[in-house]
Amino acid sequence: MIRDDLARMVQDAAQAAMDAGELPAVVVPDVVIERPARPEHGDYATNLPMRLARAARANPLDIARTIAARVPADASLAAAGGAPPGFINFRLSEAWLARQVDAISAAGAAFGDVDEGRGVKVQVEFVSANPTGPLTAGNGRGAAYGSVLASILDAAGFDVQREYLVNDAGTQTDVFGRTLLARYRQQFGEDAEIPPDGYPGEYMVELAAQIKAEAGDRYLRAEEPPDELVLRGIDVMVERIREDLEALGVVYDSWFRERSLYAPGGLYERTLARLREAGVLVEKEGALWLASTELGEDKDNVVVRSTGKPTYFASDIAYHNDKFQQRNFDRVIDIWGADHQGHVSRMKAAVSALGVDPARLEILIYQLVSFRRGDEVVRLSKRAGNIVLIRDIVEEVGRDAARFFFLARSADSQMEFDLELAKRQSAENPVYYVQYAHARIAGILANAAERIPTYDDGDVALLTHPMELALIRKMLQLPELVQLMARQLEPHHLPHYAQDLATAFHAFYTECRVLNTDELPLSKARLKLCNAARTTLARALSLMGVSAPERM
RNA sequence: GCCCCCGUAGCUCAGUGGACAGAGCACCGGACUUCUAAUCCGAUGGUCGCAGGUUCGAAUCCUGCCGGGGGUGCCA
């Protein structure tokens, strides 16, 4: 990548200048290559001279000129020069830029790939909402965030697995079972009440009706919800969750069942034994605690309740033990909503108690989404009647707009989603702007097929118009962006990039006529550019899981 | 009380310690005999919550305060 090459060249140039006695010999810090905000400052810049100024006891501008003079000439580099107050600016050669059009088309759907991950095994676990009800609109943010992050890591050369943890054990599952049994009895006209902490949603009534249709009165005499009934209920809910996620364009590699941890001699038992051996479990008040305070935590946390039942925390420790020690992921990325933030540090402490370097567990927290319909605030509790489901969002604003919307904000920011606004303004939604650019290109290429049958022999050296070069420059940023997003675990740059890229194309389209049989050589070169732009735009959209329409 | 996130244009939000702080929407003025006007060009709009500090340089880092959201020993 040109950026990494530049960093190395600057490093070498600085060292050479010191060796030659042109600069005092000091330690050269890691060279940071940035993208200047203003075009007149070139394509790349480094602030190295200013960072060297103090140690070298020299004027940063002089240092910049000295180092710039020693940056070797290169086919890709048109100019390197010092600029006040002490930057070195680099400008890419236009001939080199034009040649990248062929390189991008040759890379095709792989354009944007980088080798940042080098095959490191990483698991991304996201959503993992309780299967006690359908996915709410709020889950959509985690779904979009997780799925796109996984795609980015994939493009960056990591070996990625996408996993959903199905919580089919524990307290909430019990409550789900008791609710289901009550609704089931009601199907037979019995006067059963759902538990006070149960799930009042209408979907439980429908579920009970479905199970009655499937199984008849088989469970009618049961006092406690039979496992078979509960598991059937969970299965139906999981299937519905899977469908909802698929409707949002989210697909998993693996669905992990919490219950599988509790098989005799399974991970739960072994994990508990391991913690016991490590001496980090203490008994008090009738419960078993992880002595997290010993590990630097504010407080201890219950692992096994005084009732003898394990907490969610216990499940999660066993589950992470499985991720690291059974399945050998090098890195594990968990994506949780802000309401799980309190769970982060104790989870890391637990992993560390298992003998795993806690740096291998990265827990990303996304801030919660609030939803409005105009002036009406929408509550998102599964227990309340007035809930908005992720399915509702997809139906109202469409999969593409929903994903784009969820993605465009950084995970650290709370976001407000006005459903009425998203619906009403759907035609002005940025996603359509980006897709329109793609459809326009597809239209041009389709027209070209009739008038200019082949443009393989087009000469990209003819691409010299400022709008053409600006478009190429923007396309070439995609691999850098993939690298940045993979390093920072920040997918939200992608929608902004896609918008910039679309703008660059629309600007080119306005200024430069593509199809013109009077200027066949230029037409062919521009068709090559269109093809490369389409490749780039399609890749950006595909990373976001947003469709790239042929026409609109 | 303590912990985490946020506070940037009227609104929703970008902004790897750098060079005159950006986009979309909204609002105002222009451009379709031309490959898709779901487009383009232009104008308006900012004490980057407040106060200190670090730095050659702070929207960005540190401290305090104010405001919003989330969490806080046997829910997940």
Image (cartoon, rainbow, N blue to C red):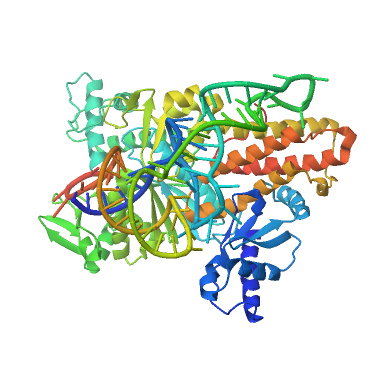
Tell me if I can see residue A262 in this picture. Answer: no
Name the spot of residue A78 as percent of width and height, x first: 74, 59
Query: Of A68 and A363, which appears nearest the observer?
Result: A68
Residue drawn at 75 percent across, 66 percent down: A73
Name the spot of residue B43 as percent of width and height, x first: 59, 31
Q: Quadrant of residue A375?
A: top left
- Image quadrant containing the N terminus of chain A: bottom right
Residue drawn at 66 percent across, 40 percent down: A504
Name the spot of residue A322 as percent of width and height, x first: 36, 57
Query: Of A126 and A267, which appears nearest the observer?
Result: A126
For this view, does B23 lie left or right of residue A195? right
Residue drawn at 41 percent across, 31 percent down: A417
For this view, does A303 lie left or right of residue A468? left
- Image quadrant containing the C terminus of chain A: top right
Q: Quadrant of residue A458?
A: top right
Q: Compared with residue A198, is residue A540 higher up or lower down, i.e. above or below?
A: below
